Amino acid sequence: MKSSPLLLLLFILLIPLPAVGQAATAYSVVAGSGANKEAVDKITSKVISAGLSASTIDFSDGKKSLFRTCSGYFTKQQDAIKHKTQLIGLTGIRDAWILNITSDILGLFPGSDSVTEEVPVKTEEVKTKNPPAKDKESKNPPAKDKESKNPPAKDKESKNPPAKDEEAKNPPAKDKESKNPQKEPVSVPPGDLNSDNLSAADIDEVIRIYKEIVVSLGKNNTDPIEKYIDPELGIIEIIDPEGIPYPIYSSSLKQAVMQGLFISTSKGDPVKDYLPEFDCNLGMWTKTGSFISKVKKYSRLTSILKDAEEVVYIDKILLNAIEKMEYRISIIIISTDETQLGFLKKEGSLYLGVVDNSFDCVE
């Protein structure tokens, strides 16, 4: 009987105990987000009109307003991934991303306590020469999976961008001036100064290059158009998966495509005319179509850097590329609700420099 206490202890240890403290987890696909509810409602309507379920959910806190278009509610992440692929194919919203629904936000989702899992319809993601027009309001999160880009965007709820090198591991204190130090002016060749040095033939040549790029991307073959990326300057894409635009640098077109580069175009040649703008107050373009024009003092890249530092680390390689490229951008192609392309002239040759997939508007 001396072994009775030991047997009793062993018996207690074998009794299964209930698991406690585990937060409920589910997933939803975010098609767009922003502080303007009316703008996000338009994205929600677009998703619904494509035959998918969606609702505008308020994630605002006491400090700032935040609304998101959420589509679907899944208990399996793989189903959410399939749904995101389907949503992109049906709506053209390339920046859709998957939200991890943790227990602290579970209550924001209608009927989440008794949800029936939504199973997406199987669809093939088809890459076309002219993908569906993108809703400008929806440009709030990667064209491909933005988390795969370098540098990755922060997920406001749970992610922090991983350090890429020694400099990124120990970023300087948030002194905006220290992150963007004033550099000595770059030596500018006379022929690269501004759009005044461009001729009508240069505009025609950019249209030709643009058409060749569209055809090659439609065939998923970047080799013939790699020559239109300057090897010294590279290419910069601007995206805004969380509503804050930031630049991504690639040294070649091949690398940019591997990082998820997306170019959306419209049918037909761009018209030689002044460029349209998107009016924030009216919620519409000043004119629609595809247009090409010379521009002076292009500054989109430097104008977004201050806010971009809130979501990504701006390294010296990117700053150097912006410094050498931005003042050269002298021809812009804008197709309403599509990608904006910036071309530059260097040493007599024309190159694609900027691919802008972010949302911008004027008051």
Image: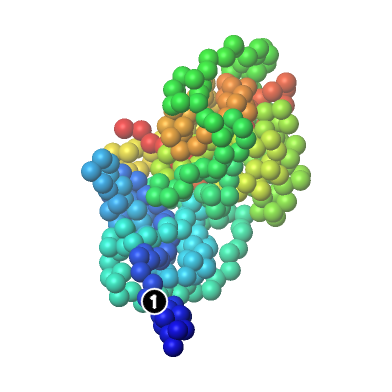
**Left or right of 280, for residue 221:** right
Q: Residues within 10 Å of mark 1 (few under 14, many from 20)?
A: few
Circle count: 1
Identify the residue at image location x=30%, y=52%: 59
Identified by mark 1, the residue type is Leu
Q: Residue furthest left?
A: 62
Residues 22 and 350: in front is 22
Q: Residue 348's x, y, as percent?
A: 72, 22
Residue 261 or residue 194, whichever sits in front: 261
Determine if residue 50 is in view.
Answer: yes
Residue ID at (61%, 38%): 164
Residue at 36% x, 56% y is 69
Element marked by disc 1: loop
Q: Quadrant of the C terminus?
A: top left
What is the quadrant of residue 255 in the picture?
top right
138 or 266, which is in the foreground? 138
Percent position of residue 125, x then y: 58, 64
Q: Quadrant of residue 188?
A: top right
Name of the residue lying farthest toward the bottom: 1
Colour style of the rendered protein structure = rainbow
Which quarter shows the N terminus?
bottom left
Q: Is 157 drawn above or below residue 47 in the view shown?
A: above
Q: Is residue 221 left or right of residue 171?
A: right
Question: Quick check: can you spot residue 291?
Answer: no
Identify the residue at horizontal 43%, vertical 50% (top origin): 158
The residue carrying mark 1 is: 17
Front-lying residue, 2 or 341: 2
Q: Is residue 94 left or right of residue 201?
A: left
Spot occupied by residue 22 in the image (x, y as percentages of width and height): 38, 66
In the rendered image, residue 91, in percent from the top left (x then y), is placed at 46, 59
